[in-house]
Amino acid sequence: MRIDKFLKNSRLIKRRTVAKEACEQERILVNDKVAKPGTEVKEGDVIHIRFGSSSVTARVIKLLDSSRKEDAADMYEIIE
């Protein structure tokens, strides 16, 4: 699954266009490498997101093509 779609489906980022822009601004890292919007993620990958002065690190637990709000939190676990 593409990183921009995963971030939207997991609700780590609200909209896919915002996720795409964050990737283009090099604010998203997948396994310590800068991610482009089309970077593929798989279960077990570690995603680091920088939001201004704060940041979030999460591990991908499962990939869902579409998710309800209740299921979105099950797609990842927060590490830091």
Image (cartoon, grey):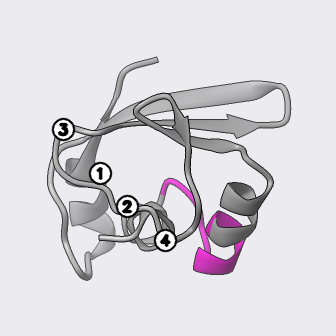
Q: Quadrant of residue 44?
A: top left
Residue 44's disc number = 3
**Kind of residue indicated by mark 1:** Ala
Give the secondary structure at mark 2: loop
Magenta residues span 12-19
Q: 61 and 67: which one is in front? A: 61
> Which quarter of the figure is the N terminus placed in?
bottom left
* Residue bearing mark 4: 38
* Front of the two marks 4 and 2: 4
Q: Residue at x 43, y 74 (%)?
A: 5
User: In the figure, is residue 29 to the left or right of 5?
Assistant: right
* Front of the two marks 1 and 3: 3
Residue 46's disc number = none
**Kind of residue indicated by mark 3:** Gly
* Front of the two marks 4 and 1: 4
**Kind of residue indicated by mark 2:** Ser
Q: 11 and 63: which one is in front? A: 63
Residue 73's disc number = 1
